[in-house]
Image (cartoon, rainbow, N blue to C red):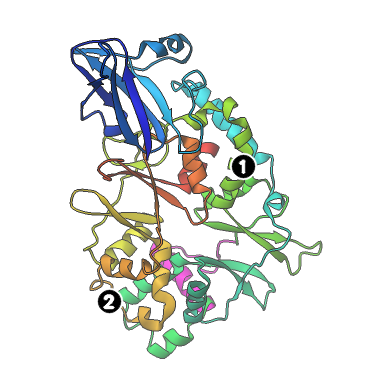
Amino acid sequence: MVQRVFTWRYGGQRVYLYGSFNGWTERIQMIKVEGSGAIFQRILELPPGCYMYRFLVDDVWQVDKEQQCFQDTYGMINNMIFVDISEPGTSSVSMAQKPNLQLSPTDIDVLRHHLSVFLSSSTAYDLMPNSVKVIALDVDVSVRQAFHFMYEEGIAVVPLWDEESTRITGILTSSDFISILLHLHSNPASLTDEEIEKHTISAWKDLKFRLHADMIGSPHRNNRRALIQAGPDETLKEIAVKILHNKISVVPVLDITQDGSCPQLLSIMCLSRILKHLCRQLRRHLDYLPLLQQPVGYLLLGTWAKGFGNSSSRVLLTLRATEPLSSALNLLIQANVSSIPIVDKLGVLVDVYCRSDIMALANSSVYAHIQLDDVKISQVLEIVNVTGQNRFQTCTRFDSLFRVMKLFSNPGVRRLIVIDATSRQVEGIITLTDIFGYIIG
């Protein structure tokens, strides 16, 4: 939290402060400075971010006249002033430096194109360290061993190696584990205990493909989708587009030999790595990209509850901690989302259940017999929260786009829950996919 002093210097009998920091719902009485007949002040503790405010002086809306000189150049909306409150130890942006917050749709499109150009200026090779360990699993490893290994290593995705074809043939993810659990839940007699113990990754992928083909009524059951991959010379934009368009989480970067045999796995590329690189590049160009200072609640990205943010066709999904685990798993798969905010009866954020949280059940073979309808979300959260680490990040709808991007560039941050700074009620959710979808279009 940062202390901010709000001052009204021009007299009056009754002076109140209104602002976006509390949703415009509460009037805050300004206190007259002792020994002064005209100056009113009020100190508030606010989280870092961008806010709007104005004063009600004797029942008339007013703004600070010292900011009036910036009105013609930077504009004010509905007789309001914008203020940027920086984190402790950083310098605030003065109103004279503050970019215009009333960008036209054309300006926004141009600035989004500039961000897209930044992505096109670097390749996958630019993000590769000089030395790195890349893990792949053989497709003949048992599913139980594979997920146990992923749990122990703390990873949610891993490439699959086929010794027979001597190439990377796919990716194993936490979503596969969820699908296995749901399949066993719907078909408890489909696999015996011995079969579950020996069921290989390859066998699961075959079963998954047949189930999908049956669901869509496809007659071409042997025509699997080719592995989505990238080369080291592909641009970051091209890789991001592959991830977005194919609705996948990672892309393996392969170095293809001239004869096309035995491609070498160089790296795994994901959106968070790309965004971290982009933020490093953009720090030197903030003055030329006012879009980055826009509050995220005013941009067409993210999923929002009614009355918050820009309208979207998507519905903000939430669950209670008392609901069964099956509700969370089915919602993750059916709605094709990576996480679900867990809220109380007032809509206040309690926790977040993510696809990767399912890996906590991979430590033993208990997952094969778990009754998904009998286990509560709260019970599973107790398991995944055993480390005591903060597993999710939040922001407000008034945080700038660049601040949100910087939060996403931190390891492990895949989504931000948008909350009201005071009540902690959930207002929306922004994901990595939302950020890149907004930049690339």
Q: Quadrant of residue 128?
A: bottom right
Secondary structure that dominates the magenta span: helix
Q: x, y percentage for residue 317? A: 30, 50
Q: Disc 1 marks which residue? A: 280
Magenta span contains residue 205: yes
Residue displayed at 26% across by 56% down = 319
Q: At which x and y percent is residue 145?
A: 50, 81
Categorize mark 1 by other alpha carbons within 10 Å: few (<14), some (14-19), many (20+).
Answer: few
Which residue occupies the foreground of this view, 49 or 324? 49
Q: Is residue 154 magenta?
A: no
Residue at image x 26%, y 32%?
23
Establish if 288 lies above or below 304. Answer: above
Above-or-below relation of 319 to 90: below
Left/right of residue 110 with respect to residue 431 in the rendered view: right
Number of numbered discs: 2
Q: Is residue 128 left or right of residue 16?
A: right
| SS for dot 2 | loop
Is residue 441 shown to the viewer in this render? no
- Residue 45 to residue 96: above or below: below
**Residue 6 location, quadrant:** top left
The residue mark sitting in front, 2 or 1, is 1
Tag 2: amino acid: Gln
Q: State which region is magenta.
A: 202-226
| Residue 423 is at least partly visible in this image | yes
Quadrant in the picture for the N terminus: top left
Percent coordinates x, y for residue 36 in the rendering: 27, 13
On the image, the x and y values in percent for residue 279 come to 58, 41
Q: Which mark is residue 371?
A: 2
